[in-house]
Amino acid sequence: MLFNYLKITLAVLKRRKFFTFISLFGISFTLTILVVATAFMDHLIAPGYPEINRDRSLYIWNIKEKDTKKGGQSSGPISFSFINKYVRTLKTPAKVAAATIPNSINIYLNNSKLNVYYRYTDANFWDITSFDFLEGKSYTQQNIDNNDFVVVINDHVRDEYVGKGQSAVGKMIEIDNVNYRIIGVVRGCPITRLQVSSDLYFPYNTYKSDLKGERYRGTFAAIILPNNPADLSKIQDEFAQVASRLKPTLGDKWFNPDKIYVSADTYLTSFTRQLKGDGENSGKSIFFTILFGVTFLFMSLPAINLININMSRIMERASEIGIRKAFGASANTLVMQFVIENIILTLIGGVIAVFLSLGVIYYLNHSGLIAYIDLSFNWKVFSIALLVSLIFGLLSGVYPAWRMSKLQVVEALKN
């Protein structure tokens, strides 16, 4: 029985090539867009090289001051002294790392200009992250205490400076009229790893600005690693108590802050808090609302199109339904045929989407559009999307098929 249904269905799909092509295009396009978009989102939020501890770390990116009376606000990264005074003094964390927000600079290597990103970090930065050192090693607290002018570079800078695969450790490199000794070379990571990516890494002792000031604001962010994941909430509570005792900075007649907001968040919360721009709220609800809305839009438009195609496809086959009923086909038989057609179309579209998604992801990973990007196929998201498409297909096919199967033979043959 099932074999007969499949045989009839394949024959119909082959005969009605236009509707088959449009249906497959709608299903495969929807699934491909959803899977690739999810791969990007997963890449932005989930742990990955070299930030493999992201899901068990806390981040302090930003501090915000508000003037609730006049409505003004001011926000920005935290200062190095803020990290030393209010973050490193926490008792629960295993380690606290400090790193500046990345900046870009032009350097000149072998008579050519190269635009690179750089950041300053402490020695703990290398303990919290998991960079692959292709040669050499990271700088240590001893290097910082000795005021050594050293630098860790990534393989891209190494290849441009000394040649691909050539050793760079021990060589001197001039950056902004200052000579640094290359101490290590790491495998680079994409710029989307916002807190750790860079082309050049300097120890903070080489930072030209004053790091001992008492201001809350600066150019740094803190990464807090607990002894175990269960300590995350303890660290958040401990830091919340510290933050509650902070006093807003002195203002002037134009801006006189009376509230201060700073918190130790998980990566996702710290990410959404930046998007929301409100110190009081994490912004997660808005973020997921937008994410749901975009996902629904991607799924609904092709799904509505698929529903219209299915209805048109079935309505145009009224004469076929009439002939089959004249030869004794029951209503259940006709409905089952259309159900199987929709299932086959969705599954074929899903197979096409798998290959398309893998192809797009492979291209993005190897095209160099975003250096070092490492997108991956998410089978869980694909399975859910395929199931949703299957449900849409069934809903859009069963009802009109049932309506048409109830037509009298004479009436169906007139259409």
Image (spheres, rainbow, N blue to C red):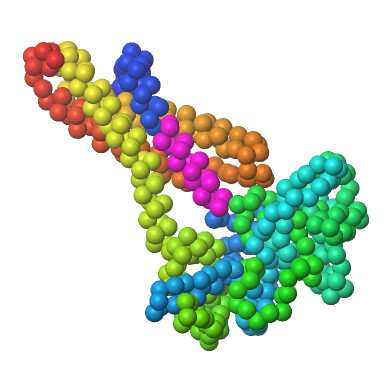
Q: Is residue 8 visible from the viewing direction of this image?
A: yes
Res 55 quadrant in image: bottom right
Relative to 16, 165 lies left or right: right
Give the residue drawn at x 44%, y 62%: 276
| Residue with the most extreme front position | 253
Which range is magenta?
Answer: 28-44
| Residue with the most extreme right position | 170
Question: Quick check: is 323 in the magenta stretch?
Answer: no
The one of 213 and 126 positioned closer to us in this rendering:
213
Give the residue drawn at x 8%, y 19%: 408
Residue 274, given in percent of the width and then of the height, sits at 50, 63
In which quadrant is the C terminus drawn? top left
Residue 2, given in percent of the width and then of the height, sits at 32, 25
Q: Is residue 183 visible from the viewing direction of this image?
A: no
The one of 346 and 69 positioned closer to us in this rendering:
69
Give the residue drawn at x 47%, y 36%: 32
The one of 51 and 219 positioned closer to us in this rendering:
219
Q: How many marks on residues?
A: 0
Res 339 quadrant in image: top left
Relative to 63, 206 lies left or right: right
Vertical side of 391 occupied by 256: above or below:
below
Give the residue drawn at x 8%, y 17%: 411
Residue 6, given in percent of the width and then of the height, sits at 34, 21
The one of 24 and 253 positioned closer to us in this rendering:
253
In which quadrant is the N terminus drawn? top left
Vertical side of 322 occupied by 129: above or below:
below
Relative to 405, 148 lies left or right: right
Mainly helix, strand or loop, the magenta region?
A: helix
Relative to 340, 370 lies left or right: right
